[in-house]
Image (cartoon, helix red, strand yellow):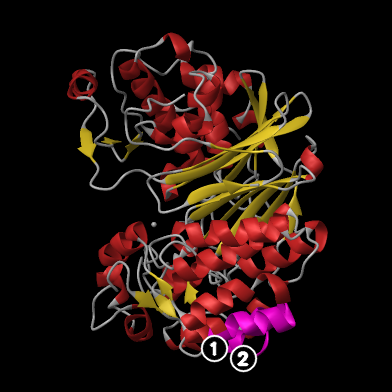
Amino acid sequence: MRDLHRPGRSPVYAPNAAIATSHPLATQVGIEVLKSGGTAADAAVAACAVLCVVEPAMTGIGGDCFALVAPKGSGEIVALNGSGRAPAAAELGWYLERGIKEIGLTADPHSVTVPGAVAAWSLLLERFGRKGLDELLQPAIRLAEGGYPVAPRVGSDWVEDTPRLLQHAVAREVMLVDGKAPAIGTRHRQPKLGATFRRIAEQGRDGFYTGPVAEDMVAELRRLGGLHTVEDFATATADWVTPIKSTYRGHDIYECPPNGQGICALMILNILSGYDIAGLSEVQRVHLLAEATKLGYAQRDRYVSDPRHVDVPVDWLLSEEHAKGLRAMIDPERAGSFRPSDFPVHKDTIYLSCVDADGTAVSFINSIFSGFGSCIMAPESGVMLHNRGRSFRIEEGHANAIGPSKRPMHTIIPGMVVKDGLAVAPFGVMGGQYQSTGHAGFLSNVLDLGMDVQEAMDAPRSFALAGKLQVENTFSAETLAALEAKGHVLEPMEKPLGGSQGIWIDRANGCLVAGSDPRKDGCALGY
């Protein structure tokens, strides 16, 4: 239990159903769907649609989606891959011939893969929903057309991303006010996006991937030099795939398979499983997580890609033999710096959790990658397009090299915990590259240190990235000094790392325990 003398949040305890999102308006819509008899899938889609309006820097229908589902709380987890593909014409040689060495961050059409979110929503509802898009999209339509107040964290992120929005004329006109981010508490409207939501509500996925909306997106991308065609959009699909898993402290941890980086979270957990985490000091825990992160991410960058195009050695990467080899590379007293040759060789996102009255649990994530994605907005439909293709490499022989109709390595990852054959927790951590480390850190807080879901989210965070150890300002000066003494180069973060949501299913007491990260604007609710 948290220290009630200090500011903080208690987890939400609910007997029937619960939902946790990063924005209170989305959580409210989700709980209303659940109370009206909707399933967890229905609530997730309705809440996500609202987030696509009220958290425009984080997510949108111009992005991608992944989900894990535990039907009626069973341990038979199913995974949904709603990540988009590169255009069919995206041959690696085309980029090499033109001297393109990397894909740009902002206003680069080559960073835009065909958005997969709407296809994923449709597939999820077809299998696990009771309501249709015609009903579930109405709250998002009202907010897009009538306007919504800009929340504090949303507004703060908006200011940070303003220089990028200025680089695309339509995005500048729609998303800025006199060239500046709308102020916190002011009302922002996106009527063209609302009209696109209406078309999807009436026509389903075809309202997005065919007809005027698709033509608008393709025309803007081609105007900027993209290779996209209306056929690329018309043939877009999401796929049911087999999840991957590993075991940590007697719990089965499920992730979506590659092309997602969930395998990296499992590799980090496999490394940590060889240590008595509960018996370590905070400094030792942070150090160990940093070293496991460096090792896991190096393997991710080397191997993870679209398994339809390359052989991703999942079994080997998740084997105990591989974890043991990586574990042996860690010096408990000194920060490591690893090179590619050291390793064995094998031939700005939203996340929400929901559990309904039938026990079905949905772990759901939807993203446009960087803040406001590519900052390319289709002029007539109001769709902000993501820049997930930035994860591709323009490099011959690389597993994640761009290719025709290929999916890039993906950072967004939903998680699910199973114990004794039953779902225990849908959970997830937002924050781009941080997500794999965030999953491992969150689960270690719960399963090693005995924290509840809210405490596990509230705990200080760190992330080893690009030769530095990013740290939030909630660590003590003594802890930071001890980390520096181990050789870590610290990078104090102006903004906190990521955000998260989670729901723990407490079958012994017959209730749900839900948490929502205070680093965002959101909340958890139940009934």
Q: Are marks 2 and 1 in contact (CB under 8 Å)?
A: yes
Q: Is residue 196 magenta?
A: yes
Gap between marks 2 and 1, in whole Å?
Answer: 6 Å
In the displayed structure, 389 sits above or below 232; it is above
Front-lying residue, 389 or 34: 34
For mark 1, give the secondary structure: helix
Q: Residue at x 75, y 59 (%)?
A: 38
Circle 2 residue: 212
Viewer-proximal residue, 224 or 90? 224
The answer to whether one can see residue 406 in this image is no
State the predominant SS element of the stretch in magenta. helix
Could you tell me which residue is drawn at 80 percent across and 37 percent down? 74
Q: Amino acid at mark 1?
A: Asp
**Residue 398, horizontal then vertical, whole percent:** 50, 50
The label number, if any, that marks residue 216 in the structure image:
1
Q: Mark 1: few, some, or many residues within 10 Å (few <14, many ≥20)?
A: some
Region in magenta: 195-217
Residue 500 image point, x, y percent: 48, 44
**Is residue 310 visible to the viewer in this orientation of the structure?**
yes
Q: Quadrant of residue 323?
A: top right
